[in-house]
Structures are given as structure tokens and as C-alpha cells.
Image (cartoon, rainbow, N blue to C red):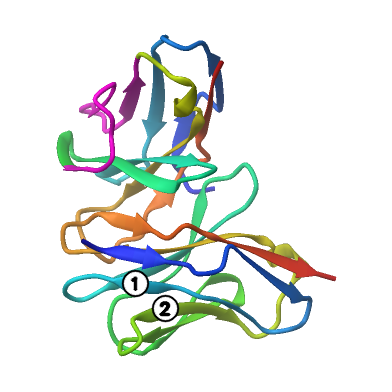
Amino acid sequence: DSGVTQTPKHLITATGQRVTLRCSPRSGDLSVYWYQQSLDQGLQFLIQYYNGEERAKGNILERFSAQQFPDLHSELNLSSLELGDSALYFCASSVERVENSPLHFGNGTRLTVT
Amino acid sequence: AQSVAQPEDQVNVAEGNPLTVKCTYSVSGNPYLFWYVQYPNRGLQFLLKYITGDNLVKGSYGFEAEFNKSQTSFHLKKPSALVSDSALYFCAVRDAGNMLTFGGGTRLMVKP
């Protein structure tokens, strides 16, 4: 068990809808990362937060947004959903902003857009 | 920009034989290299990392990885494969900007 909790495990919704994915990092970890894993594109980095502030942005669409709250949990909001947004969304956390700190991943949220 | 390449989509090996999963990287500055494993319906699990020091890094479950600076490679190895090692393996590199970039993954199939 990595200590990173993601909810819900599965989400099925229709095109055009909006969903929120939630992540609770490992106790003591200040950094939260969001990744998207699809069959044809592997793991894509979306965004990173450190202690409530955005630190790095990857290939995140404008329809997607995220935030990290004072209690360090994070939410990823996906809006105007398209079929191509169907994927596994992973949250990961790490101790601090150091290069050699490994990420600890949650078990992901599987999003299916129909 | 940093990048990671895993040239093999799948590696097949018989149980008890040694295994190698290949990874090459490109990064400016000193590389921070990682291997992760993903089992079905699970998140990625950290296996090992190279930061500095010995070129042979030992990690979890009997895995090790060899860092080769001249070849910019960080191949994952295990002397004797187990059927339970069958999974998806990801190599990753992290730069000074703290972003972790993953390779495309290699599926390891260990047959009894």
C-alpha cells in the first residue's frame, strides 16, 4: 500500500459532462502530481502542486484544472468531457521538491466517457 | 527537453532465466533515474533509483539496474526471473525542474 488514496476507483459518464477526481497524498508528502495513462500514449504528466501552489504543468488541456487544498489533498477537474478523455488518472505524491525523491502512486481512477 | 526511450514493447523470458529491460534517456545535467513496476489494475510501484555513486543499483524484489553514462542507458536486470515478475515496467528520468518523465513502458512476460 503506497499510502496514496484516490477516489472514486471507477467513473462512467457521458460526453460533455464534468467530473472531479480526488487524491489524498501520503502522510507528510507535500507534493502532488497528476498523470494520465491511456493505452496509446503511456503516462502523461498533467500537473504538479507543492504545498498548495502549482509548480509544474505538463500536457494538461484547458478543459482540465486542478488544485491542492490546505489539508494537502488534491482534486482534478475534467470538464466538457470527450471520448478521448477515457483513461486511467493517477495521483502521486512525494516528500518534497527534491530530484531524488521517488513518487508514490495511488491505484488510479478509471474514467470511461461514453 | 528530457526524454526516455524503452525500445521494447514486450520482453519474453522463461522462468529462472536472467532478464533485461532496456532504457535510454536524454537529459541536460545530471540524470535522476527511476524504475517503476505496474501490476494490473494497480498504480505504479517504485523499484529503484540512481542518483549518484555506484553504477549498479539494487532495488526491490531482487531487481537491479546498471547506469551507463557513456551510453545514456539505465537497463533493468534480474538474475533469475519469476512468473510473478510479469508486469508493466516503466523507466523514468527526473530533471532539476522536478518533473518526472516516463518511458512508454515495457511489458515483461515470464513463462513457466
Q: Of label 1 and label 2, which has the lower sequence position? A: 1
Which secondary structure, mark 1?
strand
Q: How many marks?
A: 2
Which residue lies under the disc numbered 1? B25
A71 sits to left or right of B38? left
Position of residue A11 measured from the top left corner of the image (x, y, whole percent)? 54, 20
The structure residue drawn at horizontal position 16% and vertical position 37%, both measured from the top left corner, is A54
Q: CA distance from mark 1 to mark 2?
A: 8 Å
Which residue lies under the disc numbered 2? B74
Where is B46 relative to A62, above or below?
Answer: below
The structure residue drawn at horizontal position 33% and vertical position 81%, both measured from the top left corner, is B72
Mark nearer the viewer, 1 or 2 = 1
Position of residue B80 measured from the top left corner of the image (x, y, whole percent)? 70, 82
A39 sits to left or right of A97? right
Q: Quadrant of residue B51?
A: bottom left
Q: Where does the magenta region start and end?
A: A56-79
Position of residue A53 measured from the top left corner of the image (x, y, whole percent)? 14, 36
Indicate the quadrant containing the C terminus of chain A: top left, top right, bottom left or bottom right: top right
Position of residue B14 measured from the top left corner of the image (x, y, whole percent)? 78, 76
Where is A56 relative to A75, above or below?
Answer: below
Name the amino acid type tagged 1: Tyr
Residue at the farthest right position: B112
**A95 within the magenta span:** no
Name the amino acid type tagged 2: Phe
**Is the residue under label 2 in contact with that under label 1 (CB below 8 Å)?**
yes
